[in-house]
Image (spheres, rainbow, N blue to C red):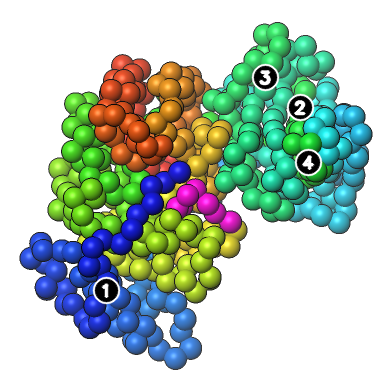
Amino acid sequence: MAPTYGPPSGAAIPDGTVGTADLADGAVTAERVSAEVRASLARADAAIPTGVTGIVDLTGLLGPVSRTPQRTPPTIVTSFQSGHGWTTLGTGVTSNLNDTTDYILGSQSASVTSNGSGAAASIRKTGVPNADLSASTVRLLIKVDGIDNLASLSLYVGDTAFSNYYIIPIYSPGDSKSISDGEWQWIEVGFANSEVGDGSPNRATITAWQLRFTDNSAAAVTVHVNAVGFVPDQSAFPNGVVSITFDDTLVTQRTVAAPLLDRYGFAASAMTIADQVGADADHLSLAQLRELRELHGWEVAGHAYTATNHNAGFSSLSESALDNELRALKTWLCAYGFGSYDYLAYPLGEFSPLIERYVGKYFSAARTIAAVPMQMLPSVNPYRLRSKTVANTTDTSQLTGLVDAAYANKGWLSLTFHSVVATADESTEYSTANFTTVVDYIASKGIPVRTVGEVLSSVG
């Protein structure tokens, strides 16, 4: 859970315009930055001709810097059309294996509904023509109805009779930020998150597939599936890659974390709350942010424009307020030279299709948080990138294990920290000793460390 911020002392935004020249002397305060951004937005709005909506139409400056190129289409194992041959398993489950009313591909999909009492429900097929997944990532086109009651969702892949198989978790409790309720979406399913279910499975000989889920015994859940396929693994990082990100503009990111990363030449991504820059001694100043970027190689990207909206989450905002928040954030990043790569970290990890659409007006990619954190590349949706949030109770062995998994399976591991301190008492703090252990292990492993922008540019 992110720390709660109050407004800096005396932080009421004054009326009137503060000129850009007045901000160039380095004496930048949160009040003056806010006033400058507000004045910039007012000038832009006044200049928009009748009939033209949106600041992107006026300047081109505030829109996404780049769009991720269209990805390689998957090799389809099945699109669940008539005669697909998949069957269901589970006590008390119901299904519609030829659903002609709700689908994206072809003219039908398949769906399975659990019994509402916690029993497993599955859809599976054995004897499928062999798929060589030794250098591939699985993609599924699915929709979940009742995400709040979903307890687990996993993919099983193995040989014909499931004598030998892998289990690849897709969803686990607390992971609702990575799947939206009632929405068709493509998701990546990578072996970096897998475990051996039984026997000695071989990724090169996959002839059996099963999607298995459970509800939380409170209500039934329906999982719809319209495609199973796979794409080649990315080649830019044959041994995987790690990104280290920091949320909330806290000063220990410069004073404690940066020196520890500098020992190995590692750069991180600073996800910024604009009105907290220079707010007090606990937050990074504009000069420190610039130093991190220009001298330490860090990437400075967006988190929120105001601490108030960050703490409430974007889901609490009206559409107009959300648009204003994102436009102000993007304006601030561009005004102070941080707009070269426009990446956003969703406050509280919250997103929805609506939030995603507004974020897409101004940013090229966005990150959530996920209980199953490994991101497989290339990403089918750059606005739903996954990351592992590190809390004060996170054991270093959990993080080093994730590093090992990324290294072995060409995965992208994003680790999100907040504050690095000597003694970590708050949930958003991580101890200096533990942080040092993790950074040292990453370096010893030999896995590359790249900023988020560098990773997306390399595989895009």
Q: Is residue 8 above or below residue 260?
A: below
Q: CA distance from mark 2 to mark 3?
A: 10 Å
Q: Residue at x 31, y 39 (%)?
A: 419
Q: Which residue is mark 4?
A: 218
Badge 4 vs badge 3, beta-carbon distance below 8 Å? no
Horizontal and vertical percent position of residue 235: 45, 31
Helix, strand or loop for disc 1: loop
Q: Is residue 350 magenta?
A: yes
Q: Is residue 366 above or below residue 207?
A: below
Badge 2 vs badge 3, beta-carbon distance below 8 Å? no
Q: Residue at x 16, y 77 (%)?
A: 19
Q: Which residues are magenta?
A: 346-352
Q: Which image quadrant is residue 403 in? A: top left
Q: CA distance from mark 1 to mark 2?
A: 58 Å
Q: CA distance from mark 4 to mark 2?
A: 28 Å
Amino acid at the residue labelled 4: Ala
- Relative to residue 331, is residue 109 drawn left or right? right
Q: Does label 2 or label 3 sit earlier along the sequence?
A: 3
Q: Which residue is mark 3?
A: 166
Helix, strand or loop for disc 2: strand
Q: Residue at x 82, y 15 (%)?
A: 161
- Relative to residue 93, is residue 406 drawn left or right? left
Q: Which mark is residue 13?
A: 1
Q: Which mark is residue 209?
A: 2
